[in-house]
Structure formats: C-alpha cells, structure tokens
C-alpha cells in the first residue's frame, strides 16, 4: 500500500510522513530529496538538469546518497532549496524522477511525501493526504528549524509556493480524492493518529 502525503513546504509533511511510516512499519520516501539532489548536481556544474536527473543514482534512507556520496547536509542549504524549486519546473526532470519513484515503490508498503505523489506518481495510492497550514505557521516552523528570520522565510516561501502552484507541469494541488488536513493548530501526534486511523479504515473497507 502507498500513502501519498502532499502539500506545500512547512505544512509538516516530512515530520508527519516519517512518523506515520514508523507507526505503520512502512518505508518512507522523500521525493523532494531527489529534486534537491538534482539541483545540487546542477549547481556543482554537473550539466543540464535533465541530464543530471537521468544520471543520478540516488539512495534514500536515513542519509541521502548520490552515486555513493553522502549529500544529506548539502541538499538542505538555502541555495539548493531555491534551485530545487527551479529544476522541478522542468518536465524532463520530473519525468526522470517520477520513473525512479515509481520503480522504488513497485513492491512493499510506502509513505511517500512530495507535491505530486497523489496526482501523478501514484494516482491509485491507498490513501492520499494533502497537508496544509497557514502561511504564517509554515514560515514560523521553517524559521525555527533554520534559526532564520521569520519575515525573510515568509517572503521566500511565498515565492516558492507561487512557483510550485503555477508551474505548467504537475503543479501543486490536492488530488480530487485526497483528505485535506490543516495542521496549523494541531500536534504532530494528533495528525499522525488521524492518518493511521484512516489507513485502518481503508484496509478494513
Ligand atoms: O519538499 P522539499 O522542500 O524537499 O522539495 C524541494 C523542491 O522540490 C520544492 O520546490 C518542490 C519540489 N518537489 C516537487 O516539485 N515534487 C515533489 N514530488 C517533491 C518536491
């Protein structure tokens, strides 16, 4: 079974997806790490984004490895974050990464996190969740994580949201059959418990 968790940056996707995977004994897939790995390769002069995406041998786990090199820290810098949003607009990059994500998820149980998991990567996912939170709450969480200025984070986030939502290929939007959960005033435990209960109901039904 695949559980798709999509939504904008700062909605709590990573924390919720990891905790849900741990609670259910499923494997966690961070699709954003793949877009970040392509962005890092491009910034390091590895070539055009589609070539970097095709060449990338990425391993996702507790660390992120690209052709054996640990890039877990490098892919989280503000430069890579900004560049990832750019490479994610390229249809050839998306096609290459979607193929890699589908290949990974052919067997077993997964909690996959991203922007287009429920709409494009696994349209027949057993459960689709679209996580949201107010822009202010999302910026506050990111600023706390990064020790950065709240106003700056909010400005960058607004730009990135706009780019993710308005891009021509696979824009960020909830799947028609997604359950939308607003995490603004909720604890992670509460949200995870609701998703686990939804999975239980889907399995029973
Ligand atoms: O979730 P994240 O912040 O690590 O994602 C990095 C970038 O990649 C972000 O700009 C959105 C993009 N992305 C995407 O377009 N599709 C996905 N499935 C995952 C991430």
Image (cartoon, grey):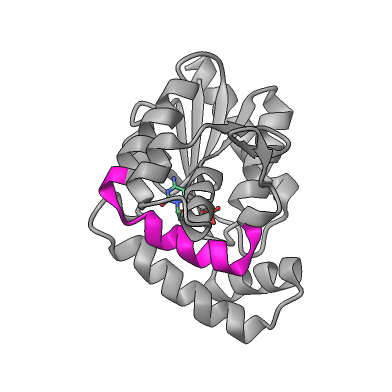
**Residue 4, percent across and down?**
48, 36
The image quarter containing residue 177 is top left
Indicate left or right for 113 with 121 as reference. Answer: right
Residue drawn at the location 54% of the way across and 24% of the way down: 201
Tell me if residue 98 comes above or below residue 149 in the rendering.
Answer: above
Q: Is residue 97 visible?
A: no
Relative depth, front residue between 14 and 24 = 14
Query: Is 103 within the magenta?
Result: no
The image quarter containing residue 109 is top right
**Residue 128, percent across and down?**
45, 37
Residue drawn at the location 71% of the way across and 78% of the way down: 148
**Residue 204, percent across and down?**
53, 16
Tell me if residue 140 comes above or below residue 104 in the rendering.
Answer: below
Prevailing secondary structure of the magenta residues: helix
Relative depth, front residue between 14 and 186 = 14
Query: Is 83 within the magenta?
Result: yes
The image quarter containing residue 192 is top right
Segment colored magenta: 76-92
Tell me if residue 15 comes above or below residue 11 in the rendering.
Answer: above
Q: Is residue 199 visible?
A: yes
Residue drawn at the location 51% of the way across and 72% of the way down: 157
Indicate left or right for 75 with 174 as reference. Answer: right
């Amino acid at each position: 079974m695949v559980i798709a968790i999509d939504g904008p940056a700062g909605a709590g996707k990573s924390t919720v997806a990891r905790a849900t995977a741990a609670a259910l004994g499923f494997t966690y897939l961070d699709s954003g790490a793949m877009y970040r790995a392509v962005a890092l390769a491009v910034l390091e002069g590895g070539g055009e984004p589609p070539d970097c995406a095709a060449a990338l041998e990425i391993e996702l786990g507790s660390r992120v490895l690209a052709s054996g090199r640990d890039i877990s820290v490098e892919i989280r810098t503000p430069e890579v974050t900004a560049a990832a949003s750019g490479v994610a607009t390229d249809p050839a990059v998306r096609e290459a990464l979607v193929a890699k994500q589908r290949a990974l998820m052919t067997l077993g149980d997964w909690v996959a996190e991203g922007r287009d998991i429920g709409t494009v990567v696994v349209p027949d996912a057993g459960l689709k969740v679209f996580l949201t939170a107010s822009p202010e709450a999302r910026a506050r969480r990111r600023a706390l994580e990064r020790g950065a200025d709240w106003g700056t984070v909010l400005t960058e986030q607004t730009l990135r949201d706009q780019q993710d939502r308005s891009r021509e290929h696979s824009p960020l939007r909830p799947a028609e059959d997604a359950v939308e959960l607003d995490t603004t005033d909720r604890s992670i435990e509460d949200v995870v418990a609701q998703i686990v209960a939804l999975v239980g109901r889907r399995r029973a039904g």
